Image (cartoon, rainbow, N blue to C red):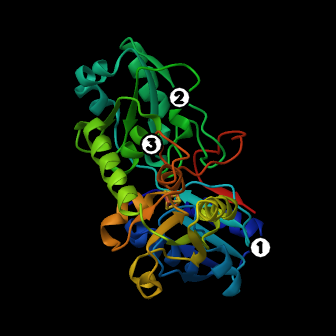
Amino acid sequence: MHELYERDVLTKLREIGAKKILIQTPEGLKKEALYLAEFLRKEGVDVIISGDINYGACDPADREARMLGCDALIHLGHSYMQLNLDVPTIFIPAFAKVDVIGALEKNLGKIRRLGKRIALVTTVQHIRNLESAKTFLEKNGFNVSIGDGDSRVSFKGQVIGCNFTAAKVEKDVDGILFIGAGYFHPIGVALSTRKPTLAVNPYSGDAIWLEREVERIIRKRWAQIAKAYDAQRFGVIVSTKKGQLRLGDAKRVMDLLREHGREAYLIAMNYINYPSLEGFDFDAYVVVACPRVPIDDAENWRKPVLTPKEVELLLGVREEYEFDEIFGGERRKDEPLGISLKL
Ligand code: SF4
């Protein structure tokens, strides 16, 4: 069970006079959502739980909260992303209670192969352990940098699936050390930085290198680009999720396609998936929304699906493969390492 700060949440709700709230949760925190709903209900708060699956802070249910007559939204699992919110929103990140030092100690040999100068990144789950990880590594002779990241993330050293600015530190580094589980984030780190990347999993104690996986993905992306080579009619997809809306980028992609003699139609979707598009019969699609959709879901699309940067490769206006990211502005300061209330 993750920490829910339920007393602090209640205090904040009372401060803003919220009597009816919506709770939004990712798949993995449904138990916590129910627990929090029960706690708040006993304290006299009227609670609705959103049944929609949530994948990121890019998709707060603040509009839905307003439609349902709620005074506030509680968003579980992710840290705050700078967005114009329709109702006061409390972000409760899911911080893991796992020791990262043991996993680093076990993998010191591999970490040394990264080189002496390393950038250290992680997801919000382990952000509270980042400073102690840095101290441990420095005691073991490494020169460790933690990047600021831009305003799309809340904390120094934090990466999310569409933003790896914290991995791009000012100092030149030999490699990137990612702390966390799974492939999703470290692959993004390696694709975005193109630096040797090692991912240390604090749960299993294992460590994986990402180079081979990155080469495999880039080969597959070139195959998608090749498949789209003769495409005439493109569906350019934008998202209606607040934190994925990139209308300016979509316009640039449409203009570029048209300048190169292709047809381009703008499509707006909330949940971007191929089956919903099947009847349109475009020759190819460009996703100008979450950059992970084309990268991680292309196998479920029967038509080529590209990122905006891949369109530039297709049309010959770019030569080097580059990962698509969503950037924010300058990140002003760290969020408090707990819940945060945003208006
Ligand atoms: S845009 Fe995609 S990768 Fe970025 S936070 Fe949203 S779901 Fe995650």
* Closest to the observer, 254 or 259: 259
Q: Earlier in the sequence, mark 2 or mark 1?
A: 1
Amino acid at the residue labelled 2 = Ile
Q: Is residue 32 above or below residue 47?
A: above
Mark 1 to mark 3: distance in Å?
A: 50 Å
Q: At 32% across and 42% down in the image, what residue appears?
A: 214
Q: Position of residue 27 (x, y in %)?
A: 40, 70
Q: Nearer the viewer, mark 1 or mark 3?
A: 3
Q: Is residue 319 above or below residue 237?
A: above
Amino acid at the residue labelled 3 = Tyr
Q: Which residue is mark 1?
A: 17
Q: Position of residue 173 (x, y in %)?
A: 46, 20
- Tell me, yes or no, if residue 182 can be seen here: no
Q: Earlier in the sequence, mark 2 or mark 3?
A: 2
Mark 2 to mark 1: distance in Å?
A: 39 Å
Label 3 SS:
loop
**Mark 1 beta carbon near ligand 1 (under 8 Å):** no
Q: Which residue is mark 3?
A: 321
Which mark is drawn over residue 110?
none
Amino acid at the residue labelled 1 = Gly
Label 1 SS:
loop
Mark 2 to mark 3: distance in Å?
A: 26 Å
Label 2 SS:
loop
Q: Which residue is mark 2?
A: 146
Where on the picture, by quarter, is residue 330? top right
Q: At 31% across and 53% down in the image, what residue appears?
A: 220
